Amino acid sequence: MVGTRSGAAGVGRQTASGSLAAKAWTRRVRGWPVVVVPFLAELIAGGYRIGVPSLWRDEAATISGSQRPLGAIIDLTLHQDAVHGAYYLLMHAVISAGGISATVLRLPSLIAMALAAGLLAALGRRLAAASGLPWPAAAGLLAGLALALVPITTRYAQEARPYALTSLTAVLATYLLVRAVPAGRWPWWASYAAALALTGYFNLFAVALALAHGVSLLLARGQAKAGDVPAGPGGPGLVTFGTLRAWVLSCLAAAVALGPMAVLALLQSGQLNWVTSPDLSTVATLIRDFAGAALAIPLVALLAVLGWVAGPGLARGRGLVLAVVALPWLILPPVVLLAVSLADPLYVERYVIFCLPALSLLVGAGLTWLVKLTGEAVSQRGAAAGRSRALAFLPSAVLAVAMVAALAGPQQAIRQPASRADNLRALAAVIGARERPGDAIWYLPWDTALVGMAYPAPFARLRDIGLGRSPIASATLRGLPASQPTVAGRLRTVRRVWTVQWTPSQPSVGPAGAGSTRLLTADGFRLVRRWRIESVFLSLYVLR
């Protein structure tokens, strides 16, 4: 009998264990839509008309840096463009497999931004639960959708540059931090260090995320107290001295991994000599673009403030709750880079795009918190239960619809053929339709040479009389220009010359080229026609 009872107990325990495992699996399956819906939303929003906007000069730089042998990419990073070396290696594989069409080049960015939206939803759900917010799954879902809704998210999902990948790795690093703090195990911290290093390899300025995380940990540090918010999945992430030590060690590991690239980047800092000092208009543009449109700024500001005060808000010692994580992430990296740029101009808006997910977290929390506040207000007025629930959702629904309406126009504009600073497709079309055998091209100044690399077919048929050494031979993106006497000698062997110049509003890293065009006229060439195509003046000179 004893054996029978023991066997029955064992079977009972196995049955109970299996039942718990089945319930846990069911919960995980039910939780997947929170992640999948924002992922699909961004995949659709970013993928719609992804190949329509023309490639522009930065994407031409991606082609130049990636479409060369692996050894030549390493040489390039050692001499000129170390900060993009990791991205060029990734894009080398993409170009080798699919070519250099706009759609193929932009696919990695689209996938990265879609993954960022899905992972942000998972992060938002965890932080909302740890903060004791109502409907944490809804808060996470709305955060992911809010990220997909902003036009600038689409802009960088449709660009062959590393900024979408930086957004993904920044969200991943933050998610791993939130998991590492309550878990306290080294695999989480090692993964966090790797994500930080990867973030830096895609955008060196994004290492400021570590500073934001440090401030979040200091704000979260404390011991559990009576009345603390209930622990969500993984707990509220209360921070101890051991947690801070693990974080410091992780940051040091990431710094060691980034060290060689950071040294090269410092030696190559002259690459940013086109950046200007920020002013108030710089800050206003950042606020507008993060909100999505000027009309959306009040709506986003209201929801962000509600997300800030939701649950425990920014209270110290309550663990890694939503506002404690999101606010330093949103504010500190842009403020630090703007402040440094007052003395040494470094700030460019795309360098801080990785902070946009933090604003989406606050917006998602604000929408759900507003439902709670409205429901409490309606209940106090004694409304019927059914009507109370309907009224509770009404303000959040109205704000969400208003945001969609305000951002519909900018979302459409971002997909237009000429929505980038350069319309290099149109430029190539003009040359392709009018070039003749024996024509030459002259890039004035030399940094305009990138415009011929995005759509290379018509340019490849032109003799580049300004080229001294090729990009691969010189380990540079554009190659090196020939000397003025060499160019003068080449001019004597051609009858038609195309010149490419920036319009006056465009930054340049070289002389404007006016003196060089005078050399053309002195040698007997006359200007036949000039086209202004967005940022570029394209001119055709013919020998008299």
Image (spheres, rainbow, N blue to C red):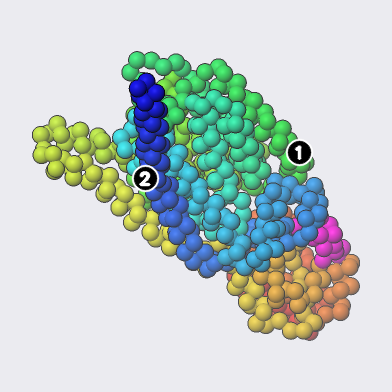
Q: Is residue 511 left or right of residue 140?
A: right
Q: Is residue 24 above or below residue 105?
A: above
Res 476 visible: no
Q: Which residue is at 26% across, 35% downward?
A: 372
Magenta region, residue range: 467-484
Q: Residue at x 72, y 73 (%)?
A: 459
Q: Could you say which quadrant of the image residue 143 lies in? A: top left
- Quadrant location of the C terminus in the rendered image: bottom right
Residue 394, given in percent of the width and then of the height, sits at 22, 46
What is the quadrant of the N terminus in the image? top left
The residue at which mark 1 appears reads as 260
Residue situated in front as seen by the camera: 120 or 214: 120
> Is residue 487 a member of the stretch shown in magenta?
no
| Place of residue 376 in the rendered image (x, y in percent of width and height, measured from the top left) | 20, 33
Q: Earlier in the sequence, mark 1 or mark 2?
A: 2
- 496 vs 64, nearest the viewer: 64
Disc 2 secondary structure class: helix
Residue 505: % across, % down: 61, 59
At 76% from the left and 49% from the top, the residue drawn is 77
Q: In terms of secondary structure, where does tag 1 sit?
A: helix
* Picture residue at 82% right of the left edge, 63% below the top: 470
| Above or below: residue 291 compared with residue 504 | above
Corner quadrant of residue 537? bottom right
Query: Where residue 336 sits in the image (x, y, percent)?
Result: 57, 34
Going by the numbered disc 1, the residue's amino acid type is Pro
Q: Amino acid at mark 2?
A: Arg
Q: Which mark is residue 30?
A: 2
